Image: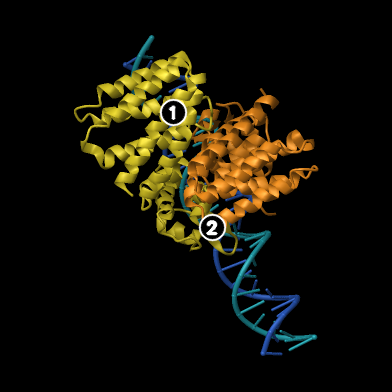
Chain colours: A yellow, B orange, C cyan, D blue
Amino acid sequence: MSGQHARVLDTLGPAITAGEYPPGSVLRTEELARRHEVSRTVVREVIRVLESMRLVESRRRVGVTVLPAEEWNVYDPRVIRWRLSGADRPRQLRSLTVLRSAVEPVAAGLAARNATPEQCAELTEHALGMVATSRGGQLEAYLVHDVAFHRVVLRASGNEMFTPIGDVVAAVLAGRTRHHVMFEDPDPAAVTLHVRVAEAIRAGDAARAESLTRDITLGALRELDVLAP
Amino acid sequence: MSGQHARVLDTLGPAITAGEYPPGSVLRTEELARRHEVSRTVVREVIRVLESMRLVESRRRVGVTVLPAEEWNVYDPRVIRWRLSGADRPRQLRSLTVLRSAVEPVAAGLAARNATPEQCAELTEHALGMVATSRGGQLEAYLVHDVAFHRVVLRASGNEMFTPIGDVVAAVLAGRTRHHVMFEDPDPAAVTLHVRVAEAIRAGDAARAESLTRDITLGALRELDVLAP
DNA sequence: GTGACCAATAAGTAGTACTTTTTAGCGGGG
DNA sequence: CCCCGCTAAAAAGTACTACTTATTGGTCAC
């Protein structure tokens, strides 16, 4: 029986982020232990993790109180995942897309200065992969290249704070593909932009890489506005 | 005796982020318990938290292995704090400044669209506060207004992912003030830019707010290049 | 030499006993 | 009648112990 702790966490975490327990409501460790049929030890470890995500705060005599959403560590990958699979998925998707639109252009500009030849090769490879899979409903294959492309750009920026944003991009793109456009082929203009970004980065043209990437993210924002205004 | 858990965490966390335990090295819970003079229970809770930050990974029979830096949750406020107070402080300071330069201009643009009248008032208040404290070595007072200004902008953007960046900005600005320029008064041009950003946001001029804020963050980047090339 | 089994090890789980802190209620005094 | 302080209870924190499970590495047999 491996992962009592993980199981309880994956029940409690999503419940909290979904707003099932409103901010200020109190959980008691003993009750949780009974409800999930584990020992108090396990519950306390789960609580510690939730506390480290600032989803809850544990105070003696009071109990474990749920914190308001403003307190949450919204950059914690698990919090992001939980929110994406829960009630405020649209809100989360929008805020992540805006984050992308801020980070990715700057990352592309840096990548133009810092990318290694191997990374440049990967970029063109994935850009061409996108071209190849952009028609005929090969959406899943296209998605793989798209995500990989953006991950390489973020990593090639050389900034350690940008690399983890790759997960955000992956989540946003996956969400988009699997949610609505599932049927239509991707926008040809977007595909071309990716190819041109790869070129700009390889050429070391930071300004152009930044500007083109801004066009990509602006497209993503517009798409979101059309879909969920 | 409040906070055994916190004490051990604040010893172990910084030690790991400082690279004291190289990636792949193994900690054993029992040994940690002896070394810090706490029970294994406490150690295990600490390990769980470190695990949730992806600083370590715990595997049966093997022990608790330290993960490479690429795995770390670099957005976790505690990880940021630990790294800033440790060995790779310069590296962290640089990467945070770059992050700022990506996020803040976009946030300012959004703030121009979304800021409430109250937030606009706060902005002008802090901008004027910066002007007032920009001369005569009142660096601490200036810092307070500066940090508050940027926090309001980030919050006024209305994007939940931007608000926590306020902590990043606070850390960067505090680091700058307390580290070197401690003696010189702040750059008058930067002060003016803040005032103009406040105006642009109040006027609802997103493009100008974004551009001016980009000037501010570019200044911060240049400053860093001069200081630690 | 290879494969399977067994033993040792270290973390995971559980249960229990005890401590600490905090709050709320009760009583006395102003 | 209100306010202050003390006390008791409640709930989390800490600790210790016993037991379980999984993993790994070595040994033995084929």
Left/right of residue A149 with respect to residue B229 in the rendered view: left
Q: Toward which corner of the image does residue A127 lie, by quadrant?
A: top left
- Chain containing mark 1: A
Give x and y (percent) for residue A120: 42, 17
- Chain containing mark 2: B
Q: Toward which corner of the image does residue D6 lie, by quadrant?
A: bottom right
Residue at left offset 25%, top offset 31%: A139
- Nearest to the observer: residue A221 or residue A53: A221
**Vertically, is A98 above or below A86?**
above
Count residues near mark 2 (Cα–Cα under 10 Å), then give few for <14, some for 14-19, many for 20+. few
Left/right of residue B90 with respect to residue B100 in the rendered view: right
Mark identifier at residue B199? none
Residue tagged 2 = B117
Give x and y (percent) for residue A94: 39, 45
Give x and y (percent) for residue A175: 32, 40
**Vertically, is A68 above or below D5?**
above
**Vertically, is B217 above or below A61?**
above
Residue at left offset 56%, top offset 31%: B66
Extreme residue toward the left, this view: A136
| Mark 1: amino acid | Ser
